[in-house]
Every structure is written in C-alpha cells, then in structure tokens.
Image (cartoon, grey):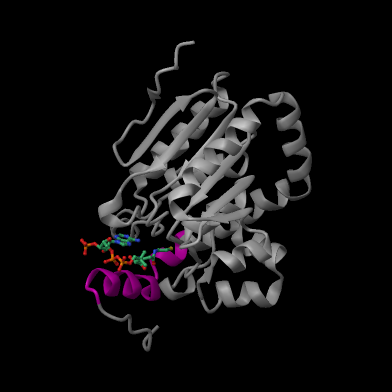
C-alpha cells in the first residue's frame, strides 16, 4: 500500500500544517520567540481550522508545539504595535474557530503554555502533556483580562479558589495539577507527547465522524452560547485594556527586559 504523502497546507512558516491519514497536524513553529503568536499566525491558524472543517479528508486535528515549548502566548510586540482592532481581527477569528470547531481536536503540550497557550486547550477535546508542561494565564500581570472564555471555563473547570490563583495571581501550575483538575488527559515524557497525540487522533479517525461530531456537539451544547457570549464580552474589554496605561507599561517593560512599574496605574 502507498503511504500518503503529507500535503503542506500551511501558508506561513511559523504555522506548519499537513494532512496525513485523516489527521491535520498544525504545528506552532516560531521557536526563536518561544512560539509566541503574531497576528499573521492567528490568521494562519484560523485558516487551517476553517480548511480542516470543510475538508472531508480531515477527520481529526492535532495542535502541537515543540518538546521544549508549547507557546509563550500572544506576541507582546504585536500587542503594543498591532493590537486587534475589531472582532474580525485574526485572534478573534481564531478563537471563534477553535471554540466552535465541530470535529475532534487533540493537543500535545510540552514546556510553557502561557496565556492563549493555555486557554486554547479549554477548547480541545483531548490534551496530552509532557511532564515539563507549565500552564499559566498571567493576563492580570499584563494589565489585561482573560480571553477565550477562560473567565467562564476556568472557574467551571477548577472551581473558583483555584481559578482565582490562576487568573488573579497569574500563578503557573504544572502538569500534575492540570491532570488533577481535568485540563489534560495524560502526562508522558516530552519526547512522547506528539506521538501519543497522533495515536489518539488515529483512533478517532477510525470511528464514524458523524457520531463523533454529534457527540461533541451534544457535550458542548450546555456551554456553547455562554462561551460565545463571554468571548465577545472579554474581547471588548481586552481590546479596550490593550490601549490603557497598565498594559502599555507591562508590554514596554517586557520589551525593555525590566520589571513593570504599576505604581502609577
Ligand atoms: N512575545 C514576544 N516575544 C516573546 C514572547 C512573547 N510573548 N515570549 C518570549 N519572547 C521572546 C523573548 O523576547 C526572547 O526574544 P530575544 O531572544 O529576541 O530577546 C525570546 O522569545 C526568548 O524568550 P526568553 O524569555 O529569553 O525565554 P525563556 O526560556 O527564558 O522564557 C517564557 C520562556 C515563555 C517563560 C518567557 O519568554 C515568557 O514569560 N514570555 C512572555 C509570556 C507572556 O507574558 N505572554 C503573554 C501572555 S498573554
């Protein structure tokens, strides 16, 4: 039997995507900047998910990073220089796409998963993590509020007290905690996470897609409207806060590699 040749559908080098044996694999590939995500990358991610949704050859999607880093979150220079102007901006297009994606979504996470690197996982169906995975949502530390409906989904997932540590203190948590609260499915050595995600995706590919999609829709139905509403509300606040003094100080401090000074904001 011929092995199908992977088809590269990625439009930019920082987001690689290919389809093989029913699985679209999307790889964050901006290692020199710790896989932080630019506006162009959000656009490519949104395009890849849209294409996976409509392509009948795709029956499951895997999102992965590198063994050492999943994602450092939004590119901070982009936050400063090219903040999302409208709800049609690539980041919001990506968030709407991933939160309503109808086919199975599997993620493989190793190393730091900061900001959207963690919140996007709330919209995946199966998440496999390396034992070096570290999750954090430090929006407050950047003068921002949560996104991706995380202000709703994180308290729902882990309970309010733990959500407050994660979202008010911005404290990171490791793979064991993520497993305990149900954010991830399994912990493996980092060198094995991507392969495990592929094996699980292949199991999904062998099942009837219509049954998978209907089951996913039914499981998500209770939250679907609330998630969409909360994402819109968070997006409006997030967009406003990006231009406010606290965020400007946090971004400038990051770029200047110094501690932010919030005493005046
Ligand atoms: N946006 C833009 N550039 C980023 C970035 C981000 N979110 N995160 C890392 N980088 C860049 C750094 O500026 C540095 O660039 P340089 O080599 O040109 O100086 C490079 O990536 C390496 O980052 P560094 O901080 O040296 O790596 P590290 O291994 O010590 O730490 C992290 C990795 C992810 C813990 C750390 O980079 C970090 O905390 N990043 C910011 C996370 C963040 O606040 N994201 C926004 C969430 S909403």
Q: Left of 240 or right of it: where is 233?
A: right
Point 58% across, 18% down: residue: 56
Q: 145 or 67: nearer the eye?
A: 67
Viewer can see residue 93: no
Span of residues in magenta: 239-257
Viewer can see residue 167: yes
Q: 137 or 24: nearer the eye?
A: 24
Q: Position of residue 127 (x, y in %)?
A: 58, 50
State which quarter of the image contains the C terminus: bottom left
Q: Position of residue 196 (x, y in %)?
A: 54, 43
- Principal SS element in the magenta part? helix
Query: Where 76 falls versus 260 (above or below)?
Result: above
Residue 96: name its quadrant: top right
Q: Position of residue 178 (x, y in %)?
A: 60, 64
Q: 264 or 26: nearer the eye?
A: 26
**Most extreme residue toward the top, as rendered?**
1
Point 50% across, 72% down: residue: 172
Q: 213 or 40: nearer the eye?
A: 213
Q: Quadrant of ligand 1?
A: bottom left
- Does the segment drawn in magenta span residue 253? yes
Q: Position of residue 97 (x, y in %)?
A: 55, 39
Residue 167: name its quadrant: bottom right
Residue 43: name its quadrant: top left
Point 60% across, 38% down: residue: 200
Point 50% across, 61% down: residue: 131
**Most extreme residue toward the left, as rendered?**
256
- Does the segment drawn in magenta span residue 243? yes
Query: Where 180 falls versus 124 (above or below)?
Result: below
């Amino acid at each position: 039997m011929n092995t199908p040749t992977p088809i590269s559908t990625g439009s930019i080098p920082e987001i690689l995507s290919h389809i093989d044996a029913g699985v679209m694999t999307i790889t964050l590939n901006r290692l020199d900047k710790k896989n932080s995500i630019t506006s162009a990358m959000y656009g490519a991610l949104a395009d890849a998910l849209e294409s996976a949704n409509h392509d009948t050859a795709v029956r499951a999607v895997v999102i992965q990073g590198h063994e050492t880093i999943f994602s450092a979150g939004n590119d901070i220079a982009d936050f400063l220089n090219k903040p999302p102007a409208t709800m049609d901006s690539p980041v919001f297009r990506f968030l709407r796409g991933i939160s309503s994606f109808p086919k199975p979504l599997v993620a493989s996470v190793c190393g730091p998963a900061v900001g959207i690197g963690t919140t996007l996982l709330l919209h995946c169906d199966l998440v496999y993590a390396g034992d070096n995975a570290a999750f954090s949502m430090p929006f407050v530390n950047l003068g921002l509020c949560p996104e991706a409906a995380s202000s709703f989904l994180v308290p729902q997932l882990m309970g309010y007290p733990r959500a407050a540590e994660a979202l008010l203190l911005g404290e990171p948590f490791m793979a064991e905690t993520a497993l305990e609260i149900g954010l991830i499915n399994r912990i493996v050595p980092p060198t094995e996470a991507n392969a495990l995600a592929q094996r699980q995706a292949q199991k999904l590919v062998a099942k009837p897609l219509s049954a998978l999609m209907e089951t996913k829709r039914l499981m998500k139905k209770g939250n679907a409207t609330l998630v969409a509403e909360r994402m819109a509300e968070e997006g409006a606040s997030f967009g406003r806060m990006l231009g406010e003094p606290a965020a400007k100080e946090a971004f400038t401090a990051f770029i200047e590699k110094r501690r932010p000074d919030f005493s005046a904001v």
